[in-house]
Image (tube, rainbow, N blue to C red):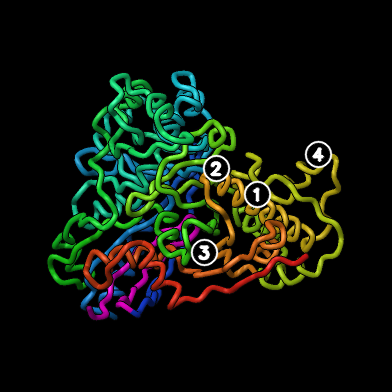
């Protein structure tokens, strides 16, 4: 095998990029060729993603990629989860609505009137998050859903525009709440048959198909969800007009990757799955362990953990923590108030704070929507009878301490629920650059933290493509060994 190149489109909740990956048996490099903002648009009634601008920027980035590397063997797309575009006859009916839009509350009420979360969890294995796709679809106007003939999650929509092929990649489909992920052998469609026969509530066989019973029960249109495709499978060739626009050779394939960005990130966590937890830390903090089977125990339900699909059929047992969003929104608030913030300087000042700062619940729903985070922290502190921070450095330190505690708690809980003996916590993504957060997570968990790679999502995207193209071979463990050999993580030992 020789070294080759692939291109990754990686769309995050605040920015996107196109990356060229160079991969071989002893080579793994990711070179950004384009970065662009992802700025949501607030209309009079809803918060939207500007998907056409994102797609245009991605195509422009691919043009740069093929200019730099004409021999690119494949293209893969990943993005955030749960959001979608509605189409009819291949035409987009409107900009996708942002998962932070307030409309989700209406969808939650409509769904739970028909099926409580406990029953949903038995069917789909997901934690309760008010913006999961099934709640968003339930909040759509009925006439719009009836008019649409296809719903495509964000990376599937981009893939459709590149290839003309409408498919739903499995790892992202698993976040919708509409994927039936237990054995269909019970004629009543109940999961209790499996739970009673599987050890410790772990379901060893799950059916990757849309849950027609649930879709009908919720009154959603049948047939709106496209066929599934697994990571590593070929989605299709670039449409001729797209290939011409970006300077690619005719027939260049688009390969399905772990299109949920966390699924791609977990591919590139250099861990031993039976002894480690991972934290994919950016706008969100996704904290969990990798397991072979769904964990549908009452304890997992009570802890609000989720079973999301991973590459090669693995299960990502994890909990969503609000993540660096809280810090980013605090910075935006101060800047709107006329106080320019240099984040590294702010974090240095936070590290020097010696005063006691509050550790608040970062998962409180008040921190979900955009807005004045310092004011919301003050509100939380007043409700809980604790002193609020006084300076911007203290707010930053309070946010970091609260995230570190949430990360530590969720890591240890994931290990307990998944039967994994956690000895190490890996932090990948942008959070791996936050030295204070990494150290305080180690301190609060009592476990060493290994930080990096920062570009885990892009690397995971690249690795799945490279394996499909024959540039590398092996299991996930083999791919992670290549990550470990080429991107040594930084170690943070817990301090007493």
| Mark pair 4, 3: CA separation | 32 Å
SS class, disc 4: helix
| Mark pair 4, 2: CA separation | 29 Å
| Mark pair 3, 1: CA separation | 19 Å
Q: Nearer the viewer, mark 4 or mark 2?
A: 2
Within 10 Å of disc 3 (Cα), the crowding (few <14, some 14-19, many 20+) is many
| Mark pair 1, 4: CA separation | 20 Å
| Residue that carries the numbered disc 1 in the rendered image | 409
Please report whichever mark, 3 or 1, sits nearer to the chain's N-terminal start.
Answer: 1
Residue toward you, 147 or 280: 280
| Residue that carries the numbered disc 4 in the rendered image | 384
Quarter of the image with the N terminus is bottom left
Residue 20 part of the magenta-drawn span:
yes
| Mark pair 1, 2: CA separation | 12 Å
Residue 2 in percent (x, y) is at: 23, 80
Res. 366 image quadrant:
top right
Residue toward you, 251 or 288: 288
Please report whichever mark, 4 or 2, sits nearer to the chain's N-terminal start.
Answer: 4
Give the side of residue 27 with respect to residue 41, left or right: left
**Residue 429 disc label:** 3
Within 10 Å of disc 1 (Cα), the crowding (few <14, some 14-19, many 20+) is some
| Mark pair 2, 3: CA separation | 24 Å
| Residue that carries the numbered disc 2 in the rendered image | 417
What's drawn in magenta, residue-wise? Answer: 1-25
Give the side of residue 315 with respect to residue 168, left or right: right
Please report whichever mark, 1 or 4, sits nearer to the chain's N-terminal start.
Answer: 4
């Amino acid at each position: 095998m020789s070294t080759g190149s692939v291109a990754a489109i990686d769309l995050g909740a605040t920015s996107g990029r196109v990356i060229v990956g160079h991969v071989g048996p002893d080579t793994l490099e990711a070179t950004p060729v384009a970065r662009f903002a992802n700025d949501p648009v607030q209309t009079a009634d809803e918060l939207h993603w500007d998907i056409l601008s994102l797609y245009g920027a991605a195509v422009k980035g691919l043009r740069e990629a093929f200019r730099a590397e004409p021999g690119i063997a494949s293209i893969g797309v990943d993005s955030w989860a749960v959001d979608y575009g509605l189409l009819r006859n291949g035409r987009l009916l409107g900009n996708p609505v942002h998962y932070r839009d307030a409309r989700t509350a209406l969808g939650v009420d409509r769904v739970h009137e028909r099926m409580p979360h406990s029953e949903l969890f038995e069917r789909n294995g997901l934690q309760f998050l008010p913006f999961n796709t099934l709640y968003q679809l339930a909040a759509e106007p009925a006439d719009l859903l009836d008019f649409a003939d296809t719903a495509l999650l964000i990376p599937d929509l981009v893939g459709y525009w590149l290839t003309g092929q409408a498919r739903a990649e499995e790892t992202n489909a698993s976040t919708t709440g509409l994927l039936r992920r237990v054995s269909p052998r019970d004629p009543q469609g109940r999961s209790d048959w499996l739970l009673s026969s599987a050890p410790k509530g772990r379901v060893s066989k799950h059916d990757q198909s849309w849950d027609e019973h649930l879709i009908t029960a919720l009154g959603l249109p049948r047939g709106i969800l496209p066929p599934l495709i697994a990571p590593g499978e070929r989605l299709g060739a670039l449409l001729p007009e797209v290939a011409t626009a970006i300077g690619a050779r005719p027939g260049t394939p688009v390969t399905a990757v772990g299109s949920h960005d966390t699924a791609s990130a977990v591919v590139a966590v250099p861990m031993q799955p039976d002894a480690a937890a991972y934290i994919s830390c950016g706008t969100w903090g996704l904290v969990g362990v990798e397991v072979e089977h769904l964990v549908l125990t009452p304890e997992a339900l009570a802890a609000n953990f989720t079973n999301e699909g991973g590459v090669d059929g693995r299960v990502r047992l994890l909990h969503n923590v609000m993540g660096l969003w809280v810090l980013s929104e605090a910075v935006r608030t101060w800047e709107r108030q006329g106080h320019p913030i240099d984040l590294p300087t702010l974090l240095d000042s936070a590290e020097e704070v010696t005063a006691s700062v509050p550790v608040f619940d970062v998962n409180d729903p008040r921190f979900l929507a955009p807005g004045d985070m310092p004011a919301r922290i003050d509100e939380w502190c007043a409700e809980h009878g604790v002193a609020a921070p006084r300076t911007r450095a203290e707010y930053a330190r309070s946010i970091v301490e609260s995230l570190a505690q949430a990360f530590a708690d969720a890591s240890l809980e994931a290990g307990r629920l998944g039967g994994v003996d956690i000895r190490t916590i890996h932090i990948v993504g942008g959070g791996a650059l936050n030295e204070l957060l990494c150290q305080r997570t180690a301190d609060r968990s009592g476990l060493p933290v290994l930080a990096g790679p920062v570009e885990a999502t892009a690397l995971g995207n690249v690795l799945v493509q490279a394996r499909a193209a024959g540039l590398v071979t092996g299991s996930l463990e083999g791919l992670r060994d290549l990550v470990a050999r080429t991107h040594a993580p930084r170690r943070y030992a817990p301090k007493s």
